[in-house]
Image: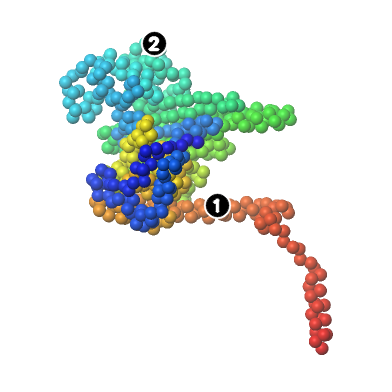
Amino acid sequence: MAYIKYNHDWKTIKEHTVLNEHQKSVGLGNVQDAIEKFIGKDAYAGINKLDENNHKKTLHSSRGKKLLESGRNVLEIDVAGSGFGLFQAQHKNVDGEGHVIEDGMMVSEKAIREKKFKKVGILNKISLLQKLPGFMRPKSEKSINKYNEIIAKYSAEVPLDQVRAARKHPGKKHAKAPVIKGADTKKIMMLDKILMEKYGKKLTDNGAWSKIRVKNKIQKTEDGVTIRKFRCMMPGPLKLGGVRDAGDYSIDNLREYMLTVGEVYLGKVIKEWQAFERKAEAAADKNDFKKAEEYRAMIKPVTISLKGHSRGAVAASHGAMKIKNWLHENYPQYEKNVDFELVQYDPVPGYFSDKGTKHRINIRQNKTPEDAKELKKLGMMPLGDKAQTTVIYSMHADHPLFFSPQNVNGAKRVIFVPEKHAANLDMVDKSQGQPHRKGYTDASTGEVYRGSGLSELPEGVYMADEKLRVVKMPNPEAGHKILKEVTKSTKLQSSRHRRLNAAIDNWFADAKEREILGKSREKQGKREKIGLEGLRELFGGIERPKKSRAQPKAKKEEVKQQKQMGK
């Protein structure tokens, strides 16, 4: 179990909040004030207990690593927001715009060019032009090769087209995709053949898959089973700088790419499961049941973890549901072996795409026959009760028009933040020395949830204040009042505010439904018990006394004697 020590920061985390820059610019009110007004100061009980002797709390983060260490296979898919080539990770200076690491420092292409490469044209020095396509890359062939060497040496992510070029031309230069020196191509899953069959020309150096990056980690468990942690990073829609939901990385295309990655990954793992099952059956046929159980224990489950931002978040929900549907239709016997986790950062489909499942979706279940019909048509199905799902909404975005979020129903956690559309992805936490992604502190316990660790946050609707301390809403009315209080001085975005309030109502209605369903299943389980032991458990361990048939006759004799005495 990992822990976080607040150290000198425990005093700061207890201080009353002040408005951040975004709140000042759009007119958002103080969230902590609103929470204390409608819930009370007890909402911060866990924070208030922090002192010099009590500042060590559980840190929930790096779930992929923990799941791998626990013996599970892990597939991670990160989908960037519109206009970004990579999912934002500002704590690593990965802002989706071509930043890489050099000598332990994150430097931009511009910095690399100025320090490592010969000077290029004067136009590349003009800051305004550097924002335009084509002005942010080194121009000479020598600088291009050098730039790619730096990426290979210091970056964990390798573009598939460059890996492909390295395989085709080992040790040779390649004009369109220079050879990656130092890239461990053997450890990267062989997607080429399947992808080529499915997408053909899109696999060229300038095609859709050329911008998708992969990272693979393979290790063996104590019983000698190979498990994999495979990570795939996809850009968001890039058409017109991300303005339009179109092109190779539109929501519709991204969900198909995610399905392909899921098919390839699960297909490989399921083949291994089937091999272990055959060995177990063969051992059982020989009455070697101990060996059969050992083989069955080698079937290691899978967790598929997706996260996305903006349109990438909308695409991530679709991609997860397409993988779930593929698994259900092709290998229903293995559904119990595959868990899903999904984190959506301010999912926004955009004005022209705000319809159908991009406008409203239930990621847990089909509420109506129409929902089921629409999902079936798209090759999707809900993730079910077991999935760990989280949605983070900006209370009021920094984009005034056409930024109404997707109405996501069925999520286990809904968090509202007083931040920009980036939903705190652009924030860095340096309080622990090394930079990390900014985490959320549970105000009731002081525990911290960061990145993929959000899937471990207790279920509920949360309001995050200016320090990202999250307070769980006791009822929908409290959530509505706090949102109204905080957004009362903002302008526009009434559609966003309506959908946020709807998200609160939907969560509480869904939680009530799950509670009733859980009780119903519990009763059904008790009804299915048979025999005396089952009856004893059903009646709380007390065996009811049997009625004697002689009792009614004895009662009659007693009444008869009383009458005679009375006479």
Callout in the foreground (2, 1): 1
Of 249 and 42, nearer the camera is: 42
Q: Earlier in the sequence, mark 2 or mark 1?
A: 2
Instruction: Answer with left or right where residue 224 lies relative to residue 163.
Output: right
Would you name the residue on which mark 1 appears?
Answer: 518
Determine the residue positioned at 82% across, 85% down. 565
18 left or right of 509 in image: left
Marks counted in the figure total 2
Q: The C terminus is located in which quarter?
A: bottom right
Is 210 drawn above or below residue 567 in the view shown? above
Local packing at callout 2 (Cα closer than 10 Å; few below 14, some 14-19, many 20+) is: few
Question: Which residue position holds label 2?
Answer: 171
Which residue type carries mark 2?
A: Gly
Asked if residue 515 is positioned above or below residue 237 in the image, the reply reads: below
Can residue 80 be seen from the camera position used here?
no
Q: Is residue 425 visible?
A: yes
Where residue 327 appears, x then y in whole percent? 51, 36
What residue is rendered at 26% in x and 34% in y? 240
Which SS class for mark 1? helix
